[in-house]
Amino acid sequence: MAKMWKGRFRGATHPLMEAFGQSISFDRELGRQDVAGSLAHAKMLAAAGLLTSGEHRAIRKGLAAIADDMAAGKFVFDPANEDIHMSVEAELTARIGAPARKLHTGRSRNDQVATDLRLWTRERQDALAERLRQVMLSLLAVAERERRLVIPGYTHLQRAQPVLLAQHLLAYVEMFDRDRGRLADARRRTNRLPLGAGALAGTTLPIDREAVRRELGFDGLCENSMDAVSDRDFAVETLSCLALIAVHASRLAEDVVLWATSEWGLVKLDDSWSTGSSIMPQKRNPDLLELVRGKTGRVIGALVALLTILKGLPMAYNRDLQEDKEPLFDAARTVGSSLECLAAFIPTLKFDEKRAAALLRDGFLDATVLAEYLVEKGLPFRTAHETVGNLVRLAEDSGRRLRELTGREMLAASPLLDAGVRRRLDPAKVPASYASAGSAGPAGVRRALAAWKKKLAK
Ligand code: ARG
C-alpha cells in the first residue's frame, strides 16, 4: 500500500505491518473529537496568517461536512488510512484538494491524538458522573420507600446488629458520591490542551495555543511539550475512577445476589431483570448482578494494562501509546452500561418484610444494645460484655432468644437487669435507639435522606 508521506521511503509497508499497526478499527471512536480539534486548529492557523481566509473557509466547510457524515453514520472509514487522524485528513484532501494540505501545519499526530483523547475522556467523565447520579437517585428512592424496614446488618457475614435497610442502601450512595468527586478531580487534570506541543518540541511557527485552548474549552495548557505528548496519566486516573466505581457496583451487586438467594429470601428479583435456566425450570437467576460483578475484572484489567504500557516508556511519544485507547474505551463503555442497568434495576427491588422480620428473630442481634443498657446502668463495658455473653450462652444452650429468658435468669446474671430491659430486647426496635451521628437508625437515616435529596436535585 502507498504511504501517505512518501518522501523518505522507497518501498511500501509490509501488509502485516499495516494490519498490525492500524488503529482505525478502534480510534474511529475519536472521530468527532478529531474534527473538533482540527476545526479549532484551522481557525487559529487562519488568525495567525498561516492559512488564507479562503483556505480556512474550504477547510471549515469540508470538516463540517465530514462531521455531519460521521454523525449520520455515513462516513466511510477507508482501512487504507491507518488511524483517525489520517482518515480525516485524507478524506478532507479528497473533498477539498489543495487547502487540506495545509491543515497539518504546526501540529503532529502526537499532540493531535493526545488532544482527541482528552476531549473524549472529558466527555466520558461527565457522562459517567451523570450515570452515577442516576444510580444514586434510584438507591435514594428505594431507601425512602422502605425507610422503616429493619434488616440484620452483618460483619464477617455473620448476623451482627439490626440496621435500617435505608442505611445499607445509603452506604452505596456515599461510595458513588465519592466516585463522582474523584471523577471531577480527574477532570481538572484532564482538561488541559496538549495541541501545539507538536511531535515533542513545539514549533517554530507562530501558533497561538491559548486561542485553541479557548476554542476547545480547556482550562489550561499542558505546559511542557514533551510531557504533553507522552503522558497518559489523565487516562490512568480515569481508569482508576472506573475501576473503583466497578468495585463499588460489584459490591452492591453481591449484596443483592445474597439477598435474592432462597437462603436469605429478602428480595425477589423482578421478572424483567431475572433470567431462567436452560435446564432447571424453577430458576430465577440474577445474571445482571453477576455480570456487573464479573465485568469489574476487565475494568481493573484495563487500569493495570495502561499502567503497564506506560511504565517503561522513554521520552517522549512512543507508538506503545496507541495501546491506551482500547482499555480506556472498553472500561468506560462497560462501567457506563453497568450503571445504566443498575439505575433501571434498583427501583424494581421488592423487599419481603415478613422475611426481614424472620431474619431478625434469631442470631441475638439485640445482644449489643443489652450490653449498652448495662453500661447506662453504670457497669464497665467489658463487664457488661461478659454478662451478656453469659446470657447468650444460656439462651443458646436452651434454644431460646434473649427476650425469652425469665426475669429471674436476667437478675441472676446481673441485678441491673431489671424489668426495664425488656423494652430493649426486640431486634426490630433496636435501630430506633441508635443515637450517634451517622448511625443506622431512623434519626440518622431521616437526616441523610433529606441531605442527599437536596444534593442530588438538579
Ligand atoms: N494512532 C496513533 C496513536 O494512537 C497516533 C499517533 C501516531 N504518531 C506517530 N508518530 N506514529 O498513538
Image: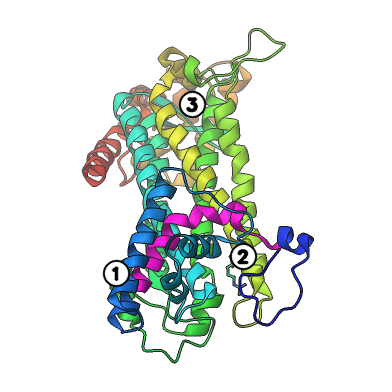
Residue 115: name its quadrant: bottom left
Query: In the image, is the residue at mark 2 within 8 Å of ligand 1 by its beta carbon?
Result: yes
Q: Please, is residue 423 above or below residue 241 in the view?
A: above
The span picked out in magenta is 21-42
Marks 3 and 2: which is nearer the front? 2
Residue 297 position in % (x across, y down): 64, 46
Q: Residue furthest bottom?
A: 204
Give the labeled residue for mark 1: 215
Badge 3 crowding class, 10 Å Cα cut-off, few under 14, some 14 to 19, many 20 or more, is: few
Of pointers 2 and 1, the one earlier in the residue sequence: 1
Secondary structure under the numbered disc 3 in the rendered image: helix
Quadrant where ligand 1 appears: bottom right
How many residues crowd around disc 1 within 10 Å: few (fewer than 14), some, or many (20 or more)?
A: some
Total label count? 3
> Which residue is tagged 3?
412
In the figure, is residue 185 to the left or right of 84?
left
Kind of residue indicated by mark 2:
Gln
**Residue 405 in sight from this viewpoint:** no
For marks 3 and 2, the one nearer the N-term is 2
